[in-house]
Amino acid sequence: MNRLEENIALNLKRIRKSRNMSLDMMAEKTGVSKSMLGQIERGESNPTVSTIGKIVEGIRVPFEELLYQKEDAVSVVQYDDLPTYREQKQEYEFKTIFPYDKIRKFEVFSGRIEAGARCCSNPHGEGAVEYVTVTKGRMILTVGQKTYEIRERQAVRFCANEPHCYQNPEKETLQFQVLMSYEAVNAF
């Protein structure tokens, strides 16, 4: 059984049991036979797209709910093991704390900019919004043609569909967190 078949089997059984449904009840709601549902749950059958479509429509769950591995309710991140992007001169770095996923439509980064350095970014596209919290230091944020000063323990939200730069005007390292959201099409 491959990973996708395993995910479908586990998720189908989990959803059915969480709703206190028997295989008979699920068969009635989905139009998929009880024996086929049992085979899918046991990983003995590889369901067609049509069969998956009947199941998700019948029990009213998103298609992705059957396909993706169910995450644990708690996820602990080891900061030192996070994927890191560093600029060649080592003037700044970003660590991906929680990467983008299709269900949540956001990602979380930790940023660090050395004294006097700056980091600029191209537009992230329509609907991209950045939520930035300065945890240490002071940031000069430029969005398009406007400039803002964000101090320690302050936060800012901006539409990230135009060029923007983070600058550290201080003599100590600037540290901040970024939550990047990709679904706020008309947020402003």
Image (tube, rainbow, N blue to C red):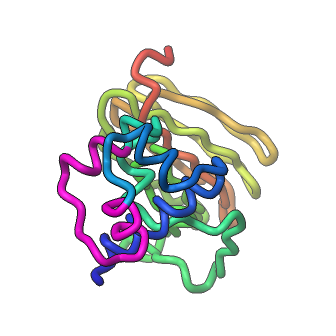
Magenta stretch: residue 131 in it? no
- Would residue 57 be visible to someone looking at this image? yes
Q: Is residue 28 left or right of residue 18?
A: left
Residue 87 pos. (x, y %):
38, 71
Quadrant occupied by the N terminus: bottom left
Q: Between residue 180 and residue 21, name the one nearer to us.
A: 21
Query: What main secondary structure does the magenta stretch of the protein show?
Result: helix
Residue 59 pos. (x, y %):
46, 39
Residue 76 pos. (x, y %):
69, 74
Q: Between residue 80 and residue 135, name the one nearer to us.
A: 80
At a point 48% along the width and 33% down the height, the residue shown is 129
Residue lying furthest right: 153
Q: Quadrant of residue 55?
A: top left
Residue 57 pos. (x, y %):
36, 35
At a point 65% along the width and 75% down the height, the residue shown is 77
Q: Is residue 152 left or right of residue 35?
A: right
Q: Is residue 5 left or right of residue 174?
A: left
Q: Quadrant of residue 151?
A: top right
Q: Between residue 162 and residue 89, name the one nearer to us.
A: 162
Magenta range is 35-55
| As drawn, 94 above or below 162 | below
At a point 35% along the width and 30% down the height, the residue shown is 161
Q: Between residue 104 and residue 153, name the one nearer to us.
A: 104
Magenta stretch: residue 45 in it? yes
Q: How many marks?
A: 0
- Would residue 86 be visible to someone looking at this image? no
Q: Quadrant of residue 54?
A: top left
